[in-house]
Image: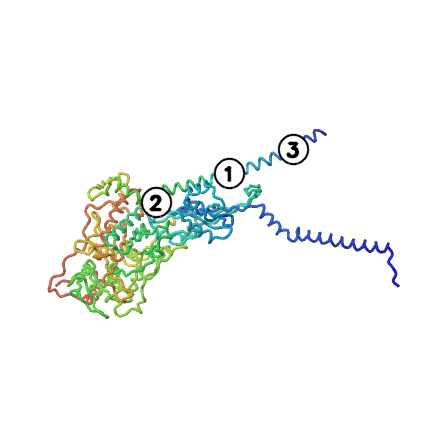
Amino acid sequence: MRTQPSPVGLRRSYFYGLSWLLSLGLFMVFSRLVFLQVIQHQTWLKKAEHYQEKRIPLHTERGTIYDRNGRILAMSIERPSLYAVPSQIKDWKAFSRRLAPLLGLSRKKILHRLQIGGREFAWLQRKLRPEVREAVEASGIEAVGFVTESLRVYPKRSLAGQVLGFVGIDNEALGGIEVRYDSILKGRKGWLVVQKDRSGKPLFPKDFKYIRPSPGYDLKLTLDEVIQHISERELDRIVQETGAAGGTVIVMAPDSGEILAMAVAPRFDPNRYRNFSSSKRQNRAITHAYEPGSTFKLVTAAAALEENLVFPEDLIDCEEGLYRVKGGAVHDHDAIGVIPFYQVIARSSNIGTIKVAEVLGRTRLASYIQAFGFGRRLGIGLPGESPGLLRNPEAWSGRSLASISIGQEIGVTPLQMVTAASVLANGGRLKTPRIIQEDSGEDAALQEQLRKKRGPLNAKRVISERVASVMTQILRTVVSEKGTARRAAVPGFSVAGKTGTAQKFDREAGRYSKDKYVSSFVGFVPAEDPALTILVAVDEPKGVAWGGEIAAPVFSRIAQAVLRYLKVPPRTEAEPPYFQAAESAQPGLEALRVLTRPSLWSAASPLNLKPRAEG
Amino acid sequence: MLLLVASIVGTAVASVWLRDEILRLEYETEGFRQTKKGLLQDQRALTVRIEQLRSLERIEAIALGELGMKPPQPGQEIYIAVRNFLEEEDPAPAGVRASEKRPERQDP
């Protein structure tokens, strides 16, 4: 028989049990308190701050891009962007019907944008004009809102469009100077952390957090708005007149290497970048390599003169327009007989130039080509700069020496060509081309960043001052009455330059095209004290394609306008070139083969004698 | 005792007023900040508009089209040699390089 517990003992048991339960409960509550207040203190503090605080992003404006005279070429402004909250729209059709006329969009497009957006957010139109915002707000349409975004504006529209590049809808730099100098231009976003009231309005307590934004740096270019405008105007004119596929003009200050204008046709307006194909957005002045044709003869001629292998008055037999080299025959545009070397250049004889190159040899020619800046990037500090196409001399074929000496089998960029011509204008020194003015600000950090963006600046000597001067005189004969570039003449100024009419290589046919040319002219003015080096290249002009007929007049018009703008006074009596372009040597004259001359000249040189060829 | 109560109530009222005033000023500051931001943006937008209107392409089109102007022809420009009395010993060169002297702005 079991004994019944006494009532007192039972109560005591209940009491102890309840005490334990209460103690356990208190312990659990206390533990939870410690857990929340001590262990998870930071987590909950952050959550509380999240609800009480408001982070206000402090956007910084992208830096402005100026020309050399402080004219604005690109700047940023703020614009409202319109979004919708699709889940709050009761009738999508009615919504789109009301909004369409205000935004200038079709109803279909608005409905499409609502569909592709999420339930809570869908962009309707970004970077609107302020008056559109006012109209939308006045209409009282619900379930829409605005956020402010930065819009990049190019107030001069297509002026230097390819050089400047552009910025996408999300402010990402996508081309040209914008992308190359993005880290400098964009700056760093800042934050303001404040408290907010029940309605979300910001309040500023004493200890509000502030992370200062770093504004983007402004950039000053070497481009001159006026010279750029003149270049683009004249380039557009010739492209339109000749029905050409495109063209390039570069204007350079030879003594500093500063690019004053870089024009590319067809034009590109970065404000409407979506309307242009990627090929039209490219800055073909630096990205596109072409066969320069006869303009390249100035490199061959300067190299031969520098090596004392030929002198300006040496007679060269141009074989009456037909000369056999390895791999085929070479022709001249005219049947030319025996003429002095300076006339070989003035009359742009392929055969005469090839004969000189044969004496020079592939190794020496290749080294001069490289010294003139071909076959490598010049380091102007723009994206997509092409090194051009120059094969290693060991890989040259039997015909390569002949072809390259007259500007075939080699790809050069317009920038390389104008830089090479500037070597002659600059007394024989190659100056690295520049498009950013690094000394425009006093900020050392900025200058350091700018230096990193481009190649090393140098002024390497390529040829002697004497040869540069002789070449200038020879190139002046090109622009004389008997030369190929009469139409490049600028009244009141002496001009030195060289024409080029290069057949384009047809990749599909695997041979040179018979009707597609690049007509070009590169020259400097005034020849005796050059202020400008100008390259004009017109791609695939229809009809007459001679560089002297197409590109030379463009050079003349640009040079006239720019010299006037720069207030360079004309010389009342420009001295005629030292070498007078005369007719061919007398018929029946036995030509001295240029191959026989080097020994004669090298023997005479140390004696300070100048041999003279007669009879 | 009454004085003590009055001073406590007065301090409390002043504190509440001060707090309210701080709040009002904070709202006002934020309002001014927004106004300033808006005005700066207006200024930038107007700067862009000025630059658009100063576009050489536009000005040239007006000069040639609406006003019937023409670029100067050869012979219409006369350069006058000016004797430089200040630098008689070291006369300026006839040709001025672009990089040596920043040109004054001039319509093409």
- Distance between the alpha carbons at the discs numbered 3 and 1: 30 Å
**Label 1: which secondary element:** helix
x 54%, y 47%: residue: A55
* Residue identifier under label 1: B31
- Residue A526 or B87: which is nearer the viewer? A526
Name the residue: 20% across, 52% down.
A487
Give the crowd class for mark 3: few <14, some 14-19, many >=20 residues within 10 Å.
few
Q: Residues within 10 Å of mark 1 (few under 14, many from 20)?
A: few
What amino acid type should be assigned to the residue bearing mark 2?
Asn
Task: Classify 10 Å Cα crowding around label 2: few (below 14), some (14-19), many (20 and above).
Answer: some
Q: Please, what secondary structure does the residue beneath circle 2 have?
A: loop
Q: Which residue is mark 2?
A: A69
Instruction: Determine whether, in the image, residue B4 is placed left or right of residue B78.
Output: right
Q: Nearer the viewer, residue A391 or A254?
A: A391
Q: Position of residue A603 (x, y in %)?
A: 21, 65
- Report the Cα–Cα distance between label 2 and label 1: 38 Å
Residue A594 percent coordinates (x, y): 19, 65
The mark that comes first in sequence, 3 or 1, is 3
Instruction: Specify whether disc 2 shares its chain with disc 3.
Output: no
